[in-house]
Amino acid sequence: MQIEIIEMEETRCKFLLKDASPADANALRRTLISDIPKMAIDHVEFHLGPIMDNEKEYESVTPLFDEQVAHRLGLVPIPTDLELMNFREECVCGGEGCPNCIVMYSLNKIGPCTVYSGDLIPLGNDSFRIRDTLIPIVDLNEGQAVLIYATAEMGTAKRHVKWQVTNGVGYNYLPTVEIDYDLCDYGMTCVKSCPRKVFDIVDGKPIVARILDCSICKTCAEDCDQNAITVTADPHNLLFSFETDGSLSAATTLKTALEILEEKFKKFEEMVSSLEN
Ligand SMILES: [Zn+2]
């Protein structure tokens, strides 16, 4: 199994999985969805009672239930450093919470205003400052205010979807489009009918110019009266793509997924060989 990167952006990745099977691709897909650890807010404390600001008194209340505000905060992508952070239950602090396993945020706003994800201020290390700053959390009315302390910790999507790093994880077989020029009438039907504009005309001949854009819809083959086009899909070479929520980069996510898979296969191999013995 080999990986050839086609596109690698900060939060988006497209690659070719070569000499693999659909089972390999699916194992990678499931690992990307549910096994990559990341930080997410898991504990929210709301200040109760009046909040004073410039000698004006505000009521600590929002138009939403506290549970809804806490749920929204949980879904805010928290920048994650996998080298630095541990799972709380595996940390040297014994799960009490320390700079190696939790990050605390404060949120202090008075209405009328919209509270955004960017209003979460990390207490301590500034590298945990929220990158997606414009996710709306709640609208405060006149006289309303919030004072919140939130704690983020590591987890995986097996526990809750707020710890899911990736979205839009999918793959399809690598398409092949062959043109039989002995049958072709050079009417360029395929060039006109392809919705993904896969074909170009070179020296009066239709050629396949952008095979990676092909969605295997077979419109070109169906519209060709000469039956000159054959569209097939290769189950051993797969086009894979996914995005991240920004808590981890696409490159780190892919690298981590491959490491986790390798570890799992190693364990599986050990278990099988122990059975043989
Ligand atoms: Zn700790």
Image: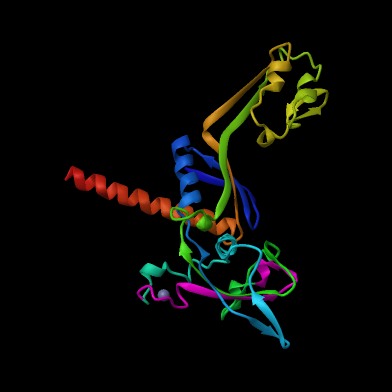
The residue drawn where x is 76% and y is 31% is 197
Residue 166 seen: yes
Q: Compared to 179, does 183 lie above or below?
A: above
Q: In the rendered view, does 275 fall on the left or right side of 55?
A: left
Quadrant of the image containing the C terminus:
top left
Residue 21 seen: no
Residue range corresponding to the magenta coloring: 94-119
- Residue extending furthest toward the bottom: 55
Q: Position of residue 39 (x, y in %)?
A: 51, 65
Q: Position of residue 103 (x, y in %)?
A: 52, 74
Q: Compared to 183, does 207 lie above or below?
A: below
Looking at the picture, tell me which residue is in the foreground, 170 or 224.
170
Q: In the rendered view, does 206 fall on the left or right side of 45?
A: right
Asked if the stretch drawn in magenta spans residue 111, the answer is yes
The residue drawn where x is 63% and y is 56% is 11
Looking at the picture, tell me which residue is in the foreground, 196 or 56.
56
Looking at the picture, tell me which residue is in the foreground, 91 or 218.
91
The residue drawn where x is 44% and y is 55% is 159
Q: In the rendered view, does 175 fall on the left or right side of 266?
A: right
Looking at the picture, tell me which residue is in the foreground, 220 or 96.
96
Q: In the rendered view, does 13 fall on the left or right side of 225?
A: left
Q: Position of residue 90 (x, y in %)?
A: 36, 68
Res 174 quadrant in image: top right
Res 183 quadrant in image: top right
Asked if the stretch drawn in magenta spans residue 5, the answer is no
